Amino acid sequence: MSVGKFIIFSIILMIIFSGCATPFSIAIKPTQYSNKFIQADCGDYLKSQLEIAKSYDTIYTAINLASIARICQDFTLSNELLDLAEDSYKYDVDLENIGSKIARNLVSVLLNDTFSDYDGNLYERIMVNLYKGLNFMSLNDFENARVEFNRALIRQDMAKEYFAPQIQAAKEELEKQS
C-alpha cells in the first residue's frame, strides 16, 4: 500500500471512530444531575455550579441546576438559572445565523452530536416559563407569575402551530384506521 493510500485510509478511519469519542466536559454528567436531584443536594454545590452554567452548555446545565434549586426551595436561584437558559434559547438558538447552523449540523454529522451544545426542545421552553411562574408564586410574586404563565401559553400556541401538519397527518391516519 502506498503512503498516499495509507494516509487517506487513516483519515477515513479517524473520522469513522471519532463518532464514538466524547468531548471533555467540565460540567456534571447526567447521572450525577439525577443523583443530586434525588438527594436534594442543597449545599454550596448549586452556587458553585452557577459559573459553569453561565459558560458551558448553558441550556442543559442551567435547566438541570434550576430543577435542583427548585427542589431545595431556592426559588430565586432557580429563576436566575432559568433566566440563563431562556436567554441562551433566545440568543444562541433562535437568533443563530444560517452559517452557524450549517457548521453545527456538519460537525454533528461528521463527528458526534456531543460536540455541540444542547439546543433543547419546544416543550422545554414552555416548561421554563411554567417553572418560573411556579417559582414566582412560591415567592408570593403573583404579578410576575402571571406574566410567566402567559408566556408559557404563548409558547404552547406556537408549538401547536409548529406541529399542526404532524397533528393533522396523525388525525388522518387515525381516521383511515377507524
Image (tube, grey):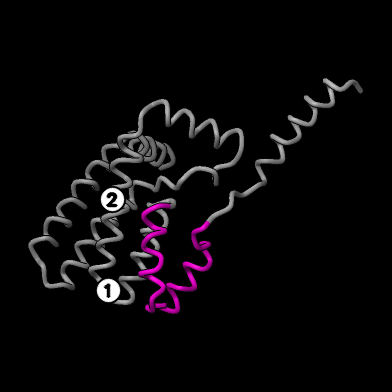
Tell me the SS state at disc 2: helix
What residue is disc 2 on?
86
User: What is the magenta segment's predominant secondary structure?
Assistant: helix
Tell me the SS state at disc 1: loop
Amino acid type at image mark 2: Glu
Residue at 35% across / 40% down in the picture? 93
Point out the image quarter for the C terminus. Answer: top left
- On screen, 9 above or below 21? above
x and y percentages locating residue 35 in the rendered image? 49, 73
Residue at 23% across / 68% down in the picture? 76
x and y percentages locating residue 140 in the rendered image? 11, 72
Camera-side residue of 172 and 53: 53
Marks 2 and 1 close (CB-CB < 8 Å): no
x and y percentages locating residue 154 in the rendered image? 19, 46
The image quadrant of residue 41 is bottom left
Amino acid type at image mark 1: Asp
Camera-side residue of 165 and 61: 61
Judge from the rendering whether residue 89 lies leftward or rightward of residue 141; answer left or right.
Answer: right
What residue is disc 1 on?
74
Segment colored magenta: 26-55
Judge from the rendering whether residue 53 lies leftward or rightward of residue 141; answer left or right.
Answer: right
**Mark 1 residue crowding within 10 angstroms, few (<14) / some (14–19) / many (20+):** some
Question: How far is disc 2 from disc 1 in space, using C-alphas?
Answer: 18 Å
Judge from the rendering whether residue 57 lies leftward or rightward of residue 124; answer left or right.
Answer: right
Question: Of all residues shown, which one is farthest toward the left?
Answer: 143
The image quadrant of residue 49 is bottom left
Q: Is residue 38 magenta?
A: yes
How many numbered markers are drawn? 2
Camera-side residue of 175 and 123: 123
Name which of mark 2 and mark 1 comes first in the sequence.
1
Q: Is residue 90 magenta?
A: no
- On screen, 139 above or below 166? below
